[in-house]
C-alpha cells in the first residue's frame, strides 16, 4: 500500500517528471557538495539529485517516510522537526557550506524560512518550492503591494530570485494554490545589525495600520533605523525612522 499524504504535515507530493527535471537542473547538484533536503517525502527530488550527487542528508518528520528513506543508499536521514535542526552542526560535519533544497510544507513555510536565517552564513544557497504568493512577497520590491516584513527580512540576508512556476496538477494531492521554485543566495556582507533588534525593527515598521508603513524602506536605511529602535515602544503609532 502506498503512502497516504498526511494533512497535518502539509504533504503534497511532487509527481510531474518534467517539473522534477527542471527543478533538478536549476539546483545543478554536483558530486562532493553538501546537500540537505527538507521534507523529501516520497523522494521525488531525492532520487534524481542522488544520481548527480551520490550522498546527501534529508530532514523528514514523518516517521513512516523516514523509515522508507533509510533504505535508500547514500542518504543520511535526520528524523526531526526541521525547526529544531542544527544546520551549523550539519555544516561542521560536512566541512563546507550547505546547499539546502526542498518542497517545503506550505503550512509552515514561513517559520522554516525564518528558522534558517541564523544559519545563512553556513549555507551556500537554497532552492525551495513554495506557495507562489509567498515567493511573490519574498522577492517583492519597495512600493509594491507584496512588499512587507517577509521581503525585508529575507532580502537583508539573501538575494532572492523566482525561477519556475509550478501548477497544482504537478502534485498529488494537488494543492489549492500555484507554486513557485525560488533560489536564495546568502549575501556575503549583509547590513551590520543585531538580528534580534532587526526583527523587532521590521515588526514595528510593518505593523498593520501604522503610519510608519506608508513610506518605502530599503536596506540603505537599516543601520540608521536600528540605532533608533530603542525609542520606539510597542503600540506606538509613529516610528522615529518613518521618513528614512
Image (cartoon, rainbow, N blue to C red):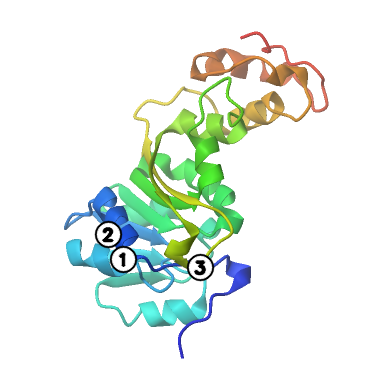
Disc 2 is placed on an element classified as: helix
Q: Are marks 2 and 1 in contact (CB under 8 Å)?
A: yes
- Residue appearing at x 52%, y 70% in the figure: 173
* Lower position in the chain sequence, tag 2 or tag 3: 2
Q: Which residue is mark 1?
A: 17
Query: What residue is shown with label 3?
Result: 80
Alpha-carbon span between mark 1 and mark 3:
28 Å
Q: Are marks 2 and 3 in contact (CB under 8 Å)?
A: no
Q: Label 3: how many residues lie within 10 Å, few (<14), some (14-19) or many (20+)? A: some
- Of badges 2 and 3, the one in the foreground is 2
Instruction: Say few, some or many: other residues with alpha carbon within 10 Å of mark 1 (under 14 / 14 to 19 / 20 or more).
Output: few
The percent position of residue 190, horizontal first and vertical second, equals: 42, 26
Q: Which mark is residue 21?
A: 2
Which corner quadrant of the image does residue 121 belong to?
Answer: top left
The residues bearing labels 2 and 3 have C-alpha atoms spaced at a distance of 27 Å
The residue lying toward the viewer, choosing from 68 and 164, is 164
Q: Is residue 129 visible?
A: yes
Along the line of sight, which residue is nearer the eye, 100 or 193? 100
* Residue 95 coordinates in the image, percent (x, y): 26, 52
Q: Is residue 109 above or below residue 189?
A: below
The residue most toward the bottom is 1
Of callouts 1 and 3, the N-terminal one: 1
| Residue closer to the observer: 168 or 184 | 168
Amino acid at each position: 500500500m502506498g503512502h497516504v499524504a498526511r494533512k497535518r504535515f502539509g504533504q503534497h507530493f511532487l509527481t510531474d517528471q518534467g517539473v522534477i527535471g527542471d527543478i533538478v537542473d536549476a539546483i545543478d547538484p554536483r558530486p562532493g557538495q553538501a546537500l540537505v533536503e527538507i521534507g523529501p517525502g516520497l523522494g521525488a527530488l531525492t532520487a534524481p539529485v542522488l544520481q548527480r550527487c551520490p550522498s546527501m542528508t534529508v530532514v523528514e518528520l514523518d516517521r513512516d517516510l523516514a523509515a522508507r528513506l533509510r533504505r535508500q543508499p547514500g542518504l543520511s536521514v535526520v528524523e526531526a522537526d526541521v525547526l529544531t535542526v542544527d544546520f551549523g552542526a550539519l555544516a561542521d560535519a560536512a566541512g563546507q557550506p550547505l546547499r539546502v533544497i526542498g518542497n517545503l510544507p506550505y503550512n509552515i513555510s514561513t517559520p522554516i524560512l525564518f528558522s534558517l536565517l541564523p544559519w545563512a552564513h553556513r549555507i551556500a544557497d537554497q532552492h525551495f518550492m513554495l506557495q507562489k504568493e509567498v515567493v511573490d512577497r519574498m522577492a517583492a520590491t519597495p512600493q509594491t503591494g507584496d512588499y512587507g516584513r517577509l521581503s525585508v527580512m529575507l532580502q537583508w540576508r539573501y538575494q532572492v530570485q523566482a525561477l519556475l512556476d509550478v501548477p497544482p496538477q504537478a502534485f498529488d494531492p494537488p494543492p489549492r494554490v500555484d507554486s513557485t521554485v525560488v533560489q536564495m543566495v546568502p549575501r556575503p556582507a549583509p547590513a551590520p545589525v543585531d538580528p534580534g533588534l532587526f526583527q523587532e525593527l521590521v515588526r514595528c515598521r510593518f505593523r498593520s495600520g501604522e503610519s510608519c508603513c506608508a513610506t518605502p524602506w530599503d536596506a540603505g536605511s537599516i543601520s540608521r533605523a536600528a540605532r533608533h529602535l530603542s525609542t520606539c515602544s510597542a503600540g506606538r503609532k509613529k516610528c522615529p525612522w518613518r521618513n528614512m
